[in-house]
Image: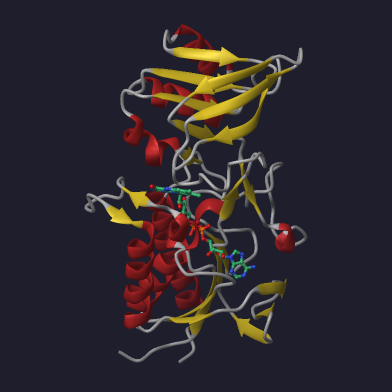
């Protein structure tokens, strides 16, 4: 098949590399910009057990599979950071850490990062009891005592999710009231095995080889040691969409404000994956976005009259 023009994709995570596969299969080229390691957040995930059709796989193996599939089809991955862009007009100009590029269609799949608590032990025990994803890792703590840190919808959803399988879930929130929706708050309060710690912060996460206990401090200055096997940090994800703030609509919390069609108001620019507004940030939803964004980008170029 004759390869037509490249579509530039920002990010070689599940959304970006899925978009590359779909674009190539639609007859276009895919040029992927990646500032770090291919695989995105997946590369730092110990085990994935919730991707359809794959019973269990390490994050590294999954990332290698994503990369190989896209590159063997012909995607080109440039390990360069996107540092600037001009999106107006049919031809978009992108500045990277190494130079400039032009493209008529752009897919932004730049992901998001889980916010960190910043306390002692968090980094050292990440993947060994410290998790940022209850949907991903919750099943590892069946019958065990765990904690969730946060007070928004995600934290309460995580606590409810874990309460179905864990013996006790401690919900630790630094304020005296939750930000989460009233319906979630009512559900949490009704669960017998969720214990709420208001006005409390985690000072340190302790454990030799894995998480063993949390050092808590409450507003009154009282300290407590809480024995848990896992702590789920749910204080939000942070997109890094500042580069696009003047050209694309963002939600209040900085995500791309685009719907299920992944289209933006700028013709030829599509957004996919965790950096887009959505109710669930997972590999499967990122990959789905990548497929949709690529199909939309191919349709857009088809209507313009594709260049060979
Ligand atoms: C610890 C952890 C465990 C998880 N476990 C699971 C799990 O078990 N199952 C599951 O379904 N989900 C899991 N997730 C969530 C899942 O990893 C994400 O939902 C998914 O990776 C999102 O894919 P994405 O392609 O949208 O973004 P990302 O994976 O974040 O990829 C975005 C990529 O874009 C690159 N990028 C960003 N800005 C630029 C720029 N300016 N220039 C060039 N490149 C750029 C980044 O370096 C990154 O590689 C986990 C997440 C974490 C943090």
Which quarter of the rendering shows the N terminus?
bottom left
Left of 60 or right of it: where is 206?
Answer: right
**Which of 112/61 is in front?**
61
Residue depicted at x 63% and y 33%: 204
Residue 108: x percent and y percent?
Answer: 57, 65
Residue 250: x percent and y percent?
Answer: 69, 50
The outermost residue toward the front is 208
**Which of 192/120 is in front?**
120
Residue 47: x percent and y percent?
Answer: 35, 50
When the figure is inspected, residue 254 is found, relative to residue 175, above or below; the finding is: below
Left of 289 or right of it: where is 120?
Answer: right
Q: Is residue 303 visible?
A: yes
Colour scheme of the rendered structure? secondary structure
Q: Count of labels shown?
A: 0
Q: In which quarter of the image is residue 90?
A: bottom right
Residue depicted at x 31% and y 27%: 142
Which quarter of the rendering shows the C terminus?
bottom left
Q: Can residue 234 be seen in this view?
A: no
Q: Quadrant of residue 121?
A: top right
Residue 192: x percent and y percent?
Answer: 42, 7
When the figure is inspected, residue 104 is found, relative to residue 22, above or below; the finding is: below
Left of 200 or right of it: where is 229?
Answer: left
Residue depicted at x 48% and y 45%: 281
């Amino acid at each position: 098949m004759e390869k037509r023009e490249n579509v530039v994709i920002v990010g070689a995570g599940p959304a970006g590399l899925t978009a590359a596969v779909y674009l190539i299969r639609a007859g276009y080229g895919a040029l992927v910009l990646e500032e770090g390691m291919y695989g995105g957040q997946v590369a730092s995930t110990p085990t994935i057990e919730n991707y359809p059709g794959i019973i269990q796989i390490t994050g590294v193996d999954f990332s290698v599979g994503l990369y190989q599939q896209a590159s063997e089809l012909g995607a080109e991955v440039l390990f360069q950071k996107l540092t600037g862009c001009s999106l107006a007009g049919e031809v978009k100009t992108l500045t990277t850490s190494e130079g400039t590029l032009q493209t008529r269609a752009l897919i932004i799949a730049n992901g998001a990062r889980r916010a960190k608590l910043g306390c002692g032990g968090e980094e050292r025990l990440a993947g060994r009891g410290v998790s940022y994803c209850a949907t991903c890792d919750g099943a590892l703590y069946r019958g065990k005592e765990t904690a969730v840190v946060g007070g928004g919808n995600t934290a309460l959803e995580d606590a409810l999710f874990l309460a179905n399988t864990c013996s006790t879930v401690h919900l630790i929130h630094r304020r005296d009231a939750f930000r989460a929706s009233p319906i979630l708050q009512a559900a949490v309060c009704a669960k017998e095995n969720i214990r709420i710690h208001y006005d409390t912060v985690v000072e340190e996460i302790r454990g030799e080889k894995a998480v063993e206990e949390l050092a808590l401090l409450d507003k009154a200055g009282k300290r407590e040691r809480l024995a848990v096997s896992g702590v789920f940090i749910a204080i939000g994800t942070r997109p890094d969409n500042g580069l696009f703030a003047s050209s694309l609509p963002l939600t209040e919390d900085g995500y791309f404000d685009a719907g299920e069609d992944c289209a933006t108001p700028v013709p030829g620019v599509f957004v996919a994956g965790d950096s887009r507004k959505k109710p669930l940030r997972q590999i499967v939803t990122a990959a789905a976005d990548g497929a949709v964004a690529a199909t939309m980008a191919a349709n857009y170029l088809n209507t313009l009259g594709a260049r060979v």
